[in-house]
Amino acid sequence: MAAIDSLAPRLAALSHVMHAFGIDDGDVQALERPPQDGPAPRPVLHGATLLLPEAPPAWALPADELHLAATLHAIGHLRHSWRRQAAGKRKPMSLALAGAIEDVRVDRLLMRRHPGVGRLFRRLLRGQPELPQMGFEAMVARLQRVLLDPQADDHDKDGGDAWVRKGRALFEAQAGRLDDAEAFREVVSVLANDLGQLRVRMNLQTYAPPLPWHDDNSHLWAHGADAEQAETPLRRPPPQGEPQPAPPQAPEEAPEPAPLPELARHDYPEWHYRLERARDNWCTVIERAVPPASASAPTLPARAPLRLARSRRLDRSQRIRRQWEGDELDLDAATEVFIDRRLGLAPDPRLFRRNGRAVPRTSLLLLLDLSASTADLQPCGRSVLDLEREAAALLMDALREREDRLEVAGFDSDGRQAVNYLRLLDFGQPVPADPATVLGAARPGLSTRLGAALRHATARLAKETSAQRTLLVLSDGTPSDIDVFDARHLVEDAARAVVEARRKGVRCFCLSLDRASEADVRRIFGHAGYRIVDDPARLAAALARSYAELAGA
Amino acid sequence: MDLTPYRLTAEPYYHPTGHEIALYEHAYAHRLPLVLKGPTGCGKTRFVEYMAWRLGKPLITLACNEDMTAADLVGRYLLDAEGTRWHDGPLTTAVRHGAICYLDEVVEARQDTTVVIHPLTDSRRILPLDKKGEIVAAHPDFQLVVSYNPGYQSHSKSLKQSTRQRFAALEFDYPAAEAEADIVAHEAGIDRALAMRLVDIAHQSRRLRERGLDEGISTRMLIYAGVLIRDGLPPVDSCRMAMTAPITDDPDMQRALGAILESAF
């Protein structure tokens, strides 16, 4: 595990590299494998996800460079290589050789387009340990070396020498057609045939592509009935360096908790896009109270406190007098200047005044999606609800000292008759010293009838007298409910609820914690009304910016 | 007042990417206020300079910032030995004497500033100076051009509908790769192959927009990097200094951009 720790901080940057090279769904993760005998584990390319093992210790190379090279190589495969071709009855050695030639082909393509990649590969090659003398792997290694590094020379004088020279000549003869994988089939078949005649054997158990940035090429072949096993299943490593919050359990594992006490019931309309009209009193929102410090508090990972931007709004009620420069003359000061002049005194030149910055009071309602889907783990290894709780805690901490009023509520739904609105922290209530005490009551439950929850939140905000009323929704974004079978219905209803809220002067913004839901969130909140955060490391920054934008800071 | 200092003496370099020049000329013929939308560093300001030169009009440019107030635009009273004296702001100068007034990044300005341009941007074409008690009728040559970057997704940094609907708009984006390479090669004085390589890097960075980068690397940054390379600095250092280091503080993103640079040269 310690080994993977050192890789983890590089993964995000390597994913960015994949995106920058045009692999939009690319991702780089750590390959977690129990230590085993045999060759060091190789990178694995699974779909557009590259799984990286630690660098093999035998190579005296910076692990950084090796991981970057592996990522670039994977980009090469994703851009240029075939996927899952039927292996048919081809021999393992022939497949391995075809893979090795393909590896060199994609590396050469990358080197042609990006000269720095060539320098990187050659630097890595020169850190290669002494090559073994005999065997298939050694011959492949030598051939790859001379193909990737024109300065390298194959010094050995045994039989491998001639084969490597021949391979080099055959490959270079096709080098003008690097883009065409077919052009190298003939090269592979001639070289494989020669190996057969040389009686070179390949050890299936120990063979791995000789260059450590080359992946295991399992993505190139489909082996008939075993095709499914050819690719290594994805296993996500648990997040590193953070205490794991209590995992949200499926409801049936815990005894069904008694429903929280009801405070009030409110009926709201729902928009039916097929009918193009709202049905009155269609949904019932049930406000529920949280018993004080009831549920066991989840542990929230420690985070740097959120820094919220200072206000940018002007407030004419706050005039700053006696300034060196400003928008208008400060009449009192100007009068004094003239009096001073008459008296022969040096006047005070600070005679302007300007409008001060407002500290507008904001009422912020933070609406947490508590539906069952928020228990799903995200690519970062934590559930949406964990991230929601963490964001809420950050915001509560940051707003404790400010004049802004904050309400934190959660919602889930069980059909249109029962949209639960859980009041975790009410407007005007002091923010508890440890936000976890109120956030503990937020447990993943039922479905997501977002529109009704938005309408109720808007109604709560409408009672506020602050200059600004804002609604920040934390969600995984896709509304659903048990009595709705048209996926578009609740999206359209929620979009309608947002329009209505904005019309009432409530600013709405959504931080969605699941990239997969982007289309729905965009439909509901508009192109400038949402932000996707699927990386917990970016949560605080995204929250601070969303707050700044919402509060007009 | 003499507007000579505001006249462009030499033709600014501008590489058209569409028929924006003709569109601007028509807009100017009718003195339609214009908004230029586009990401930062894609050539909006250069375009306005070029058009001012082409039309032979003086150009008064104002970079808007969050501390800019209405008084900074229209003017204010100052004190002198006699008492108070009115001092025209740059917008008033342009309105009174007939210049193209260009408000760069107008959404950065405080909201009260955008309201003063309203009477100038409809059929009235007047600028009321309420503190002075004067109404300035716009000179026939006056035109208002503003720019902003729609990439900022922000409630506070966007134009109000009442402002928006007074303008005709031209949309800008980074030029197509070939054209962008021509521009970088010309402006930085580097060979075209190198310019193309810089453009490739910019395209890679622009793919990272919305994945952690707020904006990709702009044409302007490519030109800066090109200038440094022309001076003899190593390309990777030049690009890091002029292109990748400025655009983000995120260490993961810096690492990724560093890898992109290393792979490009």
Image (cartoon, rainbow, N blue to C red):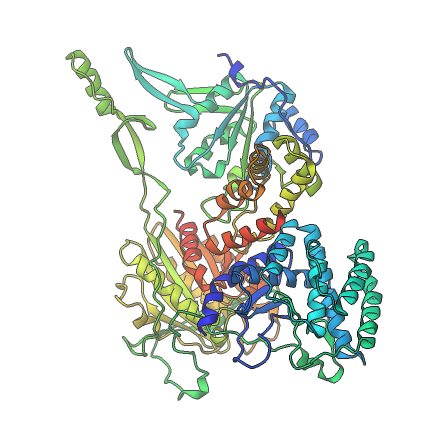
Q: Nearer the viewer, residue A222 or A381?
A: A222
Q: Quadrant of residue B238?
A: top right
Residue B60 locus on image (x, y percent): 51, 23
Residue A360 sits above or below residue A433 on the image: above
Looking at the rendered image, the quarter that the N terminus of chain A falls into is bottom left
Residue A517 sits above or below residue B219 on the image: below
Q: Count the marks: how many?
A: 0
Q: Is residue B137 visible?
A: no
Q: Is residue B109 visible?
A: yes
Q: Quadrant of residue A480?
A: bottom right
Residue at 26% x, 56% y: name it. A401
Does residue B165 appear left or right of residue A445 in this picture?
A: right
User: Which residue extends farthest front?
Assistant: A157
Q: Quadrant of residue B145?
A: top right
Does residue B218 appear left or right of residue A538 in this picture?
A: right
Does residue A233 appear left or right of residue A295 in this picture?
A: right
Residue B5 locus on image (x, y percent): 51, 16
Residue B150 locus on image (x, y percent): 55, 44
Does residue B189 appear left or right of residue A63 in this picture?
A: right
Residue A411 sits above or below residue B206 on the image: below
Residue at 38% x, 35% y: name it. B67
Residue at 65% x, 39% y: name it. B195
Q: Nearer the viewer, residue B74 or B129?
A: B74
Residue A88 locus on image (x, y percent): 80, 79
